[in-house]
Amino acid sequence: MRIEKFILILLIFSSCTQQSKKEGVTQDTVTVVSNSSEVVIDSNSVDSLSAEDLFKFEAYLVKSKVNGADVQTISESSVLVVNPTDEQIDEMIKEYGEEDFSTIAEDASFYQADAISLIDSLGVKSVNAEKPYALLVGEKTPWTINLRKEGAPGWMLIFFNKNKTPEIVPAIDVNREMLTRYFELK
């Protein structure tokens, strides 16, 4: 029952997120322009997310040129915590009304806070998303993802271990075993 409720919450949020920027879309590669360098990444992702893509990391890979000022670089293993922007909140309130939005936001915030508490208790670093894009610098591969991609939920957690492919995890599913396995804790 809890997972169905959380998925419903995510589907509601995914239907009302901002549309991503679409300037400079290329067919085969992604070019991310940062303040100091340029990174090219192969990508086959689509421009918006479907319900089945909500937790597929590959669906968030960027497909366009991105201004370095819009990119938050994360180079340490951590959990990236994404919360809705003021614009997303305003849009959700308009779409669902104050009362329904309040209920949805309380549920999503509860599950996310519960997950963050467990993450912190295990000594895993958490980082709040501050920009629309994140550059996750792994040992072998950098990944640039669009945190505000059309259809993306307002609340989400992204596990980033420098030695593994990042994972997008519903807050309601976060548990000790999952964190221990992904972050290779002892």
Image (tube, rainbow, N blue to C red):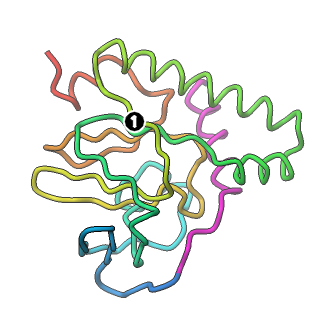
Left/right of residue 42 with respect to residue 118 in the rendered view: left
Magenta stretch: give its range: 2-22
Magenta span: chief secondary structure: helix
Q: Residue furthest left?
A: 140
- Residue 122 location, quadrant: top left
Q: Nearer the viewer, residue 179 or 173?
A: 179
**Where 182 sits versus 16, above or below?**
above
Q: Nearer the viewer, residue 117 or 37?
A: 37
The residue at which mark 1 appears reads as 127
The spot of residue 108 in percent (x, y) is: 63, 31
The spot of residue 120 in percent (x, y) is: 37, 18
Residue type at mark 1?
Answer: Val
Left/right of residue 173 with respect to residue 87 in the rendered view: left
- Residue 144 location, quadrant: bottom left
Q: Give the residue drawn at x 70%, y 48%.
A: 86
- Name the element at disc 1: strand
Q: Give the residue drawn at x 34%, y 74%.
A: 44
Q: Nearer the viewer, residue 105 or 69?
A: 69
